[in-house]
């Protein structure tokens, strides 16, 4: 395998790709969608600690995209890239909330900020 998925995630390459989905450049988005599809193929055959969470997120993203080469809102792309960072830090206080959220979903809302109202109206300060 050419790509070591764990390094791709830990060096923030996956997060960078997710942010690029909000680019105005259609060609760049097309390249990134292709990169994400190839990454997902590599990810299936590899083993590392946050593989399942990332696969779940990528699957939800695929189910959410209704048209080819869709431009994501920058805030949604940032949310997805921050999810990847969170997956590499299971000690985070948000880790459980986020993983539960992803497991309950059949798609990710690409119009509104996912989880915003739940976290904003939460009774805990953390």
Image (cartoon, helix red, strand yellow):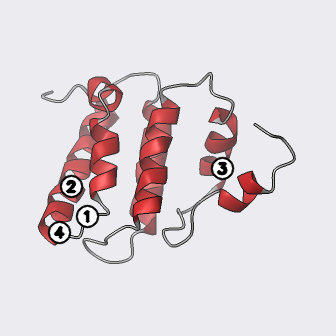
Pinpoint residue 122: horizontal percent, then vertical percent: 81, 50
Discs 3, 1 touching: Cβ within 8 Å? no
Discs 4, 3 touching: Cβ within 8 Å? no
Pinpoint residue 34: horizontal percent, then vertical percent: 18, 55
- Mark 2: few/some/many CA within 10 Å (<14, 14-19, 20+): many
Task: Name which of mark 4 and mark 3 comes first in the sequence.
Answer: 4
Q: Please give left or right for residue 115 compared with residue 120 in the image.
A: left
At 57% across and 63% down in the image, what residue appears? Answer: 113
Front position in the image: 19 or 45 = 19
Q: CA distance from mark 2 to mark 3?
A: 25 Å
Report the residue marked by disc 4: 25
Image quarter of residue 72? bottom left
Discs 2, 1 touching: Cβ within 8 Å? yes
Label 1: which secondary element: loop
Task: Name which of mark 4 and mark 2 comes first in the sequence.
Answer: 4
Above or below, 91 against 94 in this view is above
Mark 2 or 1, closer to the camera: 1
Find the residue positioned furthest to the front: 125
Report the residue marked by disc 1: 23
Q: CA distance from mark 1 to mark 4?
A: 5 Å
Q: CA distance from mark 4 to mark 3?
A: 31 Å
Report the residue marked by disc 3: 101
On residue 32, the disc is 2
Q: CA distance from mark 2 to mark 1?
A: 10 Å
- Mark 4: few/some/many CA within 10 Å (<14, 14-19, 20+): few
Q: Please give left or right for residue 62 compared with residue 21 in the image.
A: right
Task: Name which of mark 2 and mark 3 comes first in the sequence.
Answer: 2
Image quarter of residue 91? top right
Image quarter hosting the N terminus: top left
């Amino acid at each position: 395998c050419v790509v070591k998925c764990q390094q791709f995630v830990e060096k923030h390459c996956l997060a960078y790709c997710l942010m690029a989905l909000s680019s105005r450049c259609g060609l760049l988005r097309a390249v990134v969608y292709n990169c994400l599809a190839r990454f997902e193929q590599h990810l299936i055959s590899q083993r590392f600690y946050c593989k399942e969470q990332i696969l779940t997120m990528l699957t939800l993203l695929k189910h959410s995209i209704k048209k080819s080469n869709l431009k994501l809102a920058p805030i949604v792309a940032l949310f997805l890239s921050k999810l990847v960072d969170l997956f590499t830090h299971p000690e985070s206080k948000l880790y459980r909330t986020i993983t539960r959220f992803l497991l309950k979903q059949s798609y990710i809302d690409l119009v509104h900020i996912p989880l915003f109202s739940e976290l904003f109206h939460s009774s805990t300060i953390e």
